[in-house]
Image (spheres, rainbow, N blue to C red):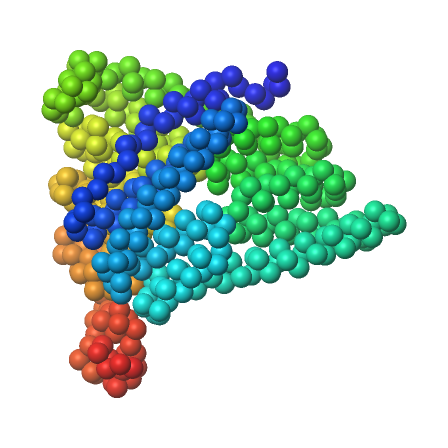
Amino acid sequence: MNRFTPIFLVFALLTATIFVGCGQGGISIIPLGAKLQNADNAFNEAELMKVRDDDPEKMKKNRAEQQKGYDRAMKLYLEVIERDAKGKYAQRAHYQIAEIYKRKYEWDKATEHYQAIVEIAPTGYYANEAKSGTANIRKNRQIIKDKRAEYQNYKALYDADPKDETFNIAAGALYEVARAYEGLENYPEAIRNYERMVEEFSAHSKAPQAQFQIGNIYFYELYDYTGGWPAFVAVTEKFPDSYEASQASTLLKQTADILTEIKQLMDEIDQNRSKKAMEYEESGRKITPADRWRMGMADLVVQSFQQVANDWEKLRNYPRAIQAYEKLASDVSHKKFAAADALYRAGTLYQQNGEYERAIQAYNRLFENAPESTWRNEAVYQQAVCYRAIREFGSAYEGFKAYMSITKGDTPYLREAEQIVRQFELDQDQDGYPFYKEQEEGTSDQDANSYPGSGS
């Protein structure tokens, strides 16, 4: 057995599914916001589904289940578009459908949905994201086409007459092909091309980087530790004197320690569940959050959930960290301070990941469930930041004003909020519309003839 291969690793990952929720049921007529959230939940469940398995048949089944999850999400997103063809909900639905098509490597269909967003609201937040997404697809597809041809030509020249120049050009081109696939989030093809780079050009200076990047993709993009583990081990074995080898050795030890701790904490959480309450719940009887846990163990469970989430953050596995925080907030909701803290942490992770609408939802849950939380003021400010990021300037304006009204003393964000509000209230062209309203409608505050509803 390799000295880097921990026995517990696969088992730790299998038990990580303790945090995966059940699929969302549906009602034919529900508010659009709720339907969109159901679609997001279905999408997230598909994203977090464990696909890799040592058994090929099981892996095939897992992939099929993941595909069903994406299909379920797409169906809900399409229903949102049908009911809100030109609205803000439709924009997000088109964007998420494009993300699903990217998972399927159907770039033309993804681009079609990006274009649909631009047609609905050409100056909006999602339009800017869509334009960037379209440009990224086109750029990387072109790189793959050009660099693959360059690799094939110069590899043939090198095979016929080995020279350093043709060797370096062919190796560099293949490396760029792999990077372009990574830019497209086509991780299986990126891995295959990095592996080819290592196999065919092991003497090249970028070969250790290519092998290391395979491990990075598994660990930090696919969250697949059983796949990434041998990739990092291969760095230490194939390129023992490289800088990447020392990095890989350190990373493997740290990851092993963290995954071991996560498994131990999850076992503790499971052991502290009240068996009687679980039996009641399975029989259909209602129980309170406090009933779920053995007498006097709730505080320990809170600490375990918090550490699990913190450990996932250390591994940059933010979806699992968010999942742990949200599980804490729902399963130990009677611990108000801890639940509020968990919702705030989930919101900040969504925000850091650019999922601003999910962050807004998390902050709203904090306001609803723990209005007296010590995180309330900060959450109000951060929610306003999220609204500004998605160009909902009216909501952002109200949020920053609310933060100013509830904040006492000199706080880290007070001056910034005051400055933003002053800017939002400007009306430089004196047309009666403040800056934030002009921004939201995509009109100019420098031209009195350009104002909301003017058509210019």
| Direction from residue 256 to residue 86 in the image, left or right | left
Q: Is residue 10 left or right of residue 382?
A: right
State which quadrant residue 316 falls in. Answer: top left
Frontmost residue, 39 versus 123: 39
Front in this rendered view, residue 156 or 9? 156
- Which residue is depicted at the point 25% across and 38% down? 24
The image position of residue 314, as x and y in percent, is 43, 34
Q: Residue at the location (83% across, 47% down)?
A: 159
- Quarter holding residue 444: bottom left
Quarter of the image that includes the N terminus? top right
> Count of labels shown?
0
**Direction right: furthest residue:** 161
Q: Quadrant of residue 456?
A: bottom left
**Residue 76 in view, yes or no:** yes
In this rendering, would 142 be left or right of 327? right
Q: Is residue 134 left or right of residue 74?
A: right
Q: Position of residue 40 (x, y in %)?
A: 30, 46
| Image location (x, y in percent) of residue 2 | 62, 19
Above/below status of 340 relative to 174: above
Camera-side residue of 333 and 129: 129
Vertical side of 282 occupied by 432: above or below:
below
Residue placed furthest toward the bottom: 449
Q: Residue at x 59, y 41 (%)?
A: 191
Residue 254 visible within the image: no
Q: Nearer the viewer, residue 313 or 233?
A: 233
In x, y percent, where is residue 392?
A: 25, 62
What residue do we see at 55% from left, 41% from top?
A: 188
